[in-house]
Image (spheres, rainbow, N blue to C red):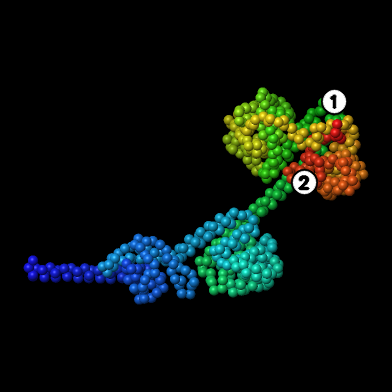
Amino acid sequence: MALPERQSAEQSKLQTVEQFRLALEASASVFRSLVERIADGVLVLCSEGMIRFANPAAAELLGFPIDQLENLPFGRPVAPGETSEIDLLPQRGSGQIRTAELRSVGIIWEAAPAILVSLREITVRKQLEESLRFLAEASRVLSQSLDEQTILTTAAQLAIEFLGIAVRVDMPITRTESIADRLVDSKWRNVLRLDSRPDRQAAWQSRAASDFDYSSQTLSWIADALGSPQPLLRRAGDWGPDPECLACCLPLREAGRIFGVMTIFRVSGARFPEADGSLIENFVQRVAASLHNAELYRQSQELNQRRLEFLAMLGHELRNPLSAARHALELHRSEFPAASPPMSVQIAERQMQQMARLVDDLLEASRLTRGQIRLECQPTMLQPILEHAIQTSQSDWQSRQQSLDYSPPMEPIWVDADAGRLEQVFGNLLHNAAKFSDSGQSIRLVVHPRSDVVTVEVIDFGIGMSEVQLQQLFAGIGVEISATARERGGLGIGLTLAKQLTELHRGELHAWSAGLGQGSRFSVRLPRIAAPTQPVVPEVVANATVKPAMLPKVPRPVRVVLVEDHADGRKMLQSLVQIWGHTVESAGLARDGLTLIQRVRPDIALIDIGLPDFSGYELAKRIRQWEAEAGLGEARIELIAMTGYGVATEQALSQAAGFDRHWVKPIDLGQLEAVLANWPIEVG
């Protein structure tokens, strides 16, 4: 190429390079003018990590003047394509660490490889995320307890971990008022003081004032906290573990109730930013909600306990007249043993049986609800249980001119069961079938044995059930009783009781009906067990005080003392025992009964538990103490408790008081007659 041509080409290259340089300078100028206006920090780092460019926002985030940033090292390696979080220096006057989100990308800067870094402060977002996590965790942990002290202790531990160094909670002794000024006028108590510093905790506790000795300054603090729409912020003074602490005090308020005030402390020099105040307020609201839930639970437990006590008292009050009426009917039979009882007596007997069943079902359902029924299961043949259930319910279907179709299975069927409770299941089902069948209809009792299970069905052809009635059938107490059920009688809890008892036997109870007027079918499915290799002692013998090697002597009149405050019941039972050939003396008060027993020294004492002056339990204890002091030894009196309180704890109380037997009213007169007829029992 000729010289002029080479010169021309070289000049053209120089012009191109110059144009490219000018373009780069122009683009850099545009870049600078753009990034200087945005809120995010922007840095350009060279390959060695030195800052080549920083916009004002980056200088503010990093805490350096912008003219000092260039050519400073960034302080940490950055790779292209990175997204991470970095800590920033606290702002002047604040000790709080800030956080920024870092993003990077590779670029060409001044004709050399470089890294463009963007910085965005996310301190507020991080605080919000942490606050939400803390509140969610607080809600989860606080919801796990319904005990007030546990809730407060848990809340204090959470507050110390996330919000401050110490916590105290103060509560009014009486929470009947929700108006702040009346609350301040009431007495207060400090229920919790917790400091994360053990030495301060001990000192704080040692100078704690009496629970009830609150100074006017203290009550003024409480009044300010209760009346302030915002969290109360002030120096702790005597209120906190350290007088120089900063305190944030809020009322524990929920559903119009004030449960107290909670105060959270921070070290001297620290402050509660507005965001922290909102967080503490949200936290304290959750604590108050948990306290409210705990109070509702406690109130419901107290209400339930009062209801159960009422049911027990109701059972006692109903069983006393029932006992008297039953004893009167039995006395009538004893006076006219050969005569057939008149229709009026038969009706009275049936109605008393129905009333006794209603009382028993009501109290049994209550005990089942509280989990106070414990089965005493053992290998048991099913056939005797069914036959006994048929006998006990016979009057139900015979009085309606109904018939029962039952064919006992030929093979022995063994189940692991509490015989009395399982008989109760089938008795309730047979009673229900008779009650909801018309006069003259039949009832079927069918047993379907299989290798591992046995199914017992009670089938009637009575009024049947709708789909809605089937769904509510086992709802128990609290469900609306249908008009038909009201007409036929009953509380609608017998079937619920049967189902729950079946399930306690690891069985199932189901009901079917094709509709109204189509009858019903109830199916009890129970696990079947193999026949036992050793003889099973019947429950009646196993629980008796008679040893198999003992035989009764020739019956003789038994000396009996009856202590019963229900006058009619006492007279009827006393007359019956006398007709049986025994001697009876009675008293209506426990104190008179004790004097009578010490004078007569009876063989057997029948003692009512609910006596007006002091309880039958106390009377039994005094009798046993008197026997020990008198040195009666083997001549101890047989004590039999009679109670209308059909609750599971009564039997344990009877045994602890010294009773030998525990009978629920109306007592089984046949059982009493047998005990008297076989007295005394000696080794043969």
Residue toward you, 240 or 213: 240
Q: Amino acid at mark 2?
A: Leu
Which residue, given by chain and number where applicable, does mark 1 sit on? 338
Element marked by disc 1: loop
- The reply to whether dot 1 and dot 2 touch (C-beta < 8 Å) is no
Q: Which mark is residue 680?
A: none
Q: Is 143 left, or right, of 72 in this rendering? A: right
Q: Amino acid at mark 1?
A: Ala
Q: Is 132 left, or right, of 428 in this rendering? A: left
Q: Quick check: can you spot residue 243?
A: yes
The earlier-in-sequence mark between 1 and 2 is 1
Q: Residue at x 29, y 65 (%)?
A: 113
Q: Is 154 left, or right, of 676 in this rendering? A: left
Mark closer to the observer (1, 2): 2
Q: Quadrant of the C terminus?
A: top right
Which residue, given by chain and number where applicable, does mark 2 sit on? 653
